[in-house]
Image (cartoon, grey):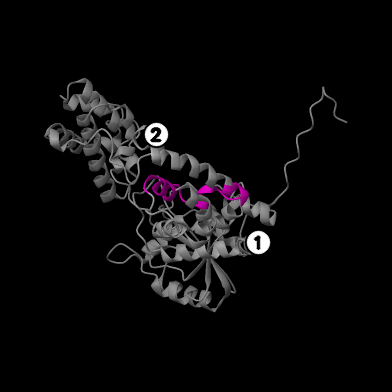
Amino acid sequence: MNTPDSPASPPEAPEYTLVAAPAEGIPDVVRTPEALTAITAALAAGHGPVALDTERAHGFRYSGRAYLIQLRREGAGTVLLDPIAFSGADGRAHLGSLAEALSDAEWILHAATQDLPCLAEVELLPHTLFDTELGGRLLGLPRVSLGSLTERALGKSLAKEHSASDWSRRPLPESWLNYAALDVELLVPLRDWVAQELQAAGKRDWAEEEFAYLVDHAADPPHRRKDPWRRTAGTHEVRTPRGLAVVRELWQERDQIAARLDKAPGRILADRAITALAAQAESRGFALSRDAVRSVNGFTWRQASRFENNWIAATERALGLPTADLPPKRAAAEGPPHPKNWEHRFPEAAQRWAAMRPATVELAETWSLPVENLISPDALRRLAFEPPTPASTASVDAFLADLGVRQWQRDLVVPVVAPLV
């Protein structure tokens, strides 16, 4: 028995069955036209939904392309497909025939927004989709990673150790292929559990609307942020427009080199080296020599030093720009400014935001949802900043619909926020 002087014993960690290897072993990687024809026929002849996943090389390569595609379907087993082996003259694989063979099947992905861009690049696009990660979010589950959901739903733990590996490496080690095959091993039973939970929670229709939205936008190009160079680490320490011009020119030069070599930009030149040189240029009155560039940590890295002339040229371009061509100290806002700046400049918008934001947070909590899955922060900010006039339930609903807010979301949100506009 516990006493005030003896702390309670910590709860025992739940026990899960470790799934360390695919039940049917590791299949051979599909790399030839003959093998592709065979697995296409096998998958088409299978039954039930198709589980899919991809492996990319973030942190190693510039592109977000898939370097391995995993598929699994009852009656066909697991397939490991190397899309790089099927690259055409344009450098991309064209797997539309495989997509067509699976057009009648529901495709299951986990966190589909991460995989759909690289699947679209090789013409693998679904007609129907089930996203187990998004389903978990709609259920309000506290952890929605693949491992967390399989433990909760199936009592099984997946061996996970190669998610951050360089999947562009060839040949791929057997242990990596084992890991990749496991990513689709349990997706079908996990999908069934998530679907049952959504049905029981009265959220199945919500999920189907979300999944249909993902399918409709699967081929959309990824959003590219305006002035992405402003996200360079350490930019906040650069004080002047000309210093920012140094950051911009170096970032753009690095980006072009990285794209040409298909290497992650940070493996060519570190962000901190870029902003450190810009800060040094400011302190030197924008008079930089080759020795000054070499004195900045990062520019003498083996990879960076290969392109020393590029860095010198980029810096000279920045220093020679007329004042009118220098970047502003603050980026132009994409959409409304941040609400923290509204109180004095936009007091009416600030009042609307102060009412709408907590109301939607409370509504999300009522339905056990992350608030960002109830309504995107951007959509709510736009509504608070510049609502439709005249404001009514119908006009607010139409306003949010134009921003891509789904019907189920509007059914919940509009009655709450329309009176606050």
Query: In what element is the residue under mark 1?
Result: helix
Q: Is residue 139 left or right of residue 396?
A: right
Q: Which residue is mark 1?
A: 193
Q: Residues within 10 Å of mark 2 (few under 14, many from 20)?
A: some
Which is nearer the eye, 116 or 384? 384
Nearest to viewer (mark 2 / mark 1): 2
The quadrant the N terminus occupies is top right
| Amino acid type shown at disc 1 | Trp
Looking at the picture, does residue 309 appear above or below residue 116?
above
Q: Main secondary structure of the magenta part?
A: helix
Could one spot residue 239 in this view of the protein? yes
Is residue 148 placed above or below 71 in the rendered structure?
Answer: above
What residue lies at 35% left-to-right and 44% top-to-bottom?
Answer: 336
User: Is residue 162 something that shows in the picture?
Assistant: no
Find residue 209 and report its horizontal and vertical position in percent. 51, 64
- In the image, which residues are magenta? 363-386
